[in-house]
Image: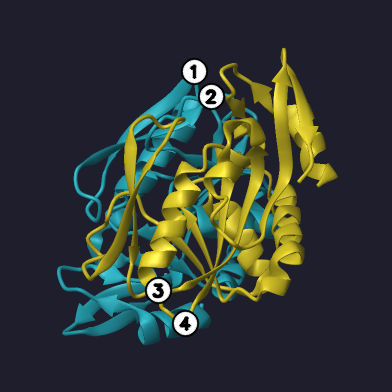
Chain colours: A cyan, B yellow
């Protein structure tokens, strides 16, 4: 997706150690026009797998998931990291390790919103080591729902997430794939 | 906003102690069609105060803020509760007490994304005790930006948030105002 690659080149900041900062348009401040285009592109890529629901993790996954849900007219469920008091019933729970947050986080989804009849499209902001996405895949499996597809806005292919997800037999698409950082230069690859 | 009131009546669940569960369409699962309508209604209400930016708090504020930002074509900034490693620079920080999460949370915004020239519209999912919104108001003041308006999707007027915000001299709008719970019946009021 050229619009996204151009934005990463103009406004992304490489912080070293494989960490790309996209806080100015995606992860802290959100550009609504870019995000709408992200949603439309995910909709185009995943329409054919006929998802019935989108699953993401709070917080940075919510914007691309909502934009896609608006485009496909599908409900979005975001896995919570802290269970609020309103979530009193049965739930599905998986643990993921976060590099940018530090430490482990639980991802919790109420069993009310993942049902065996659902076809789930998992979306997130980044596909890097795939820790978060792999935890979401496990949540879908535990719920008895069918996984329909996996999408990430930005993939850092050098962190091996695709290999971690190699057993996942559904389409996986990222809208921008970073093959490597060459000094402070960002080198994109393809799927 | 009748669409929202109807949805609260059909799918909201009163859990007692003044706590309303709206997890099936807003706070855990999101209905994208309702959320688009919420964004359009906030856009209609706040267009005249000419905001340049929308500020909310993760996670449940992100969806209504993004929907509104898409409608008004304005950037959205969400205050973070945990500072990720990508947020290395100077920041503004305020503490809010959360009833539904339990305990105190820090709300952090990078000083890169709140500037003195900004006119900030604060949006959140709930206006109840106004703890979160008051912390966001303090963040705006600390940054030197101008507060332009305050909006909440659902207000629980009996928790006194409007009184807490009485010193805030900008328009405050909620899309559905719950005056009280009568047994398990929800009684709406007006602004």
Q: Which residue is mark 2?
A: A111
- Circle 1 marks a residue in which chain? A
| Camera-nearest label, 4 or 2 | 4
- Establish if B47 lies above or below B139: below
Separation (CA) of disc 3 from disc 4: 8 Å
| Camera-nearest label, 1 or 4 | 4
Mark 2: few/some/many CA within 10 Å (<14, 14-19, 20+): some
* Discs 2, 3 touching: Cβ within 8 Å: no
Residue at 39% of width from left, 61% of height from top? B139
Query: Which label number is shown at residue A90?
Result: 1
Residue at 59% of width from left, 33% of height from top? B23
- Establish if B20 lies above or below B124: above
Query: Which label number is shown at residue A136?
Result: none
x and y percentages locating residue B122 in the rendered image: 55, 59
| Camera-nearest label, 1 or 3 | 3
- Circle 4 marks a residue in which chain? B
x and y percentages locating residue B75 in the rendered image: 53, 72
Separation (CA) of disc 4 from disc 2: 45 Å
> Disc 3 on helix, strand or loop?
loop
Residue A169 in sight: no
Residue placed most toward the observer, B42 or A76: B42
Separation (CA) of disc 2 from disc 3: 44 Å
- Circle 2 marks a residue in which chain? A
* Discs 2, 1 touching: Cβ within 8 Å: yes
Residue A189 position by quadrant: bottom left
> Disc 1 on helix, strand or loop?
loop
Q: Which residue is mark 3?
A: B144
Q: Are marks 2 and 1 on the same chain?
A: yes
- Circle 3 marks a residue in which chain? B
- Establish if B73 lies above or below B33: below
Mark 3: few/some/many CA within 10 Å (<14, 14-19, 20+): some
Q: Which residue is mark 4?
A: B117
């Amino acid at each position: 997706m050229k619009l996204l690659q151009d934005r990463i080149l103009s406004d992304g900041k490489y912080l070293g150690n494989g960490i790309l900062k996209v806080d100015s348009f995606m992860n802290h401040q959100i550009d609504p026009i870019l995000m709408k285009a992200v949603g439309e592109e995910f909709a185009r890529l995943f329409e054919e797998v006929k998802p019935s629901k989108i699953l993401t993790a709070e917080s940075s996954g919510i914007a691309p998931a909502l934009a896609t849900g608006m485009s496909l007219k599908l409900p979005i469920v975001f896995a919570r990291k802290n269970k609020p008091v309103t979530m009193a019933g049965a739930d599905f729970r998986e643990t993921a390790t976060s590099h940018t947050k530090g430490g482990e986080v639980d991802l919790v989804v109420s069993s009310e919103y993942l049902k065996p009849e659902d076809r789930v499209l998992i979306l997130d902001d980044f596909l890097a080591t795939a820790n978060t996405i792999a935890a979401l895949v496990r949540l879908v499996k535990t719920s008895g729902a069918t996984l329909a597809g996996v999408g990430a806005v930005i993939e850092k292919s050098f962190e091996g997430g695709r290999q971690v997800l190699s057993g996942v037999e559904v389409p996986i698409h990222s809208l921008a794939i970073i093959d490597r950082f060459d000094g402070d230069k960002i080198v994109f690859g393809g799927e």
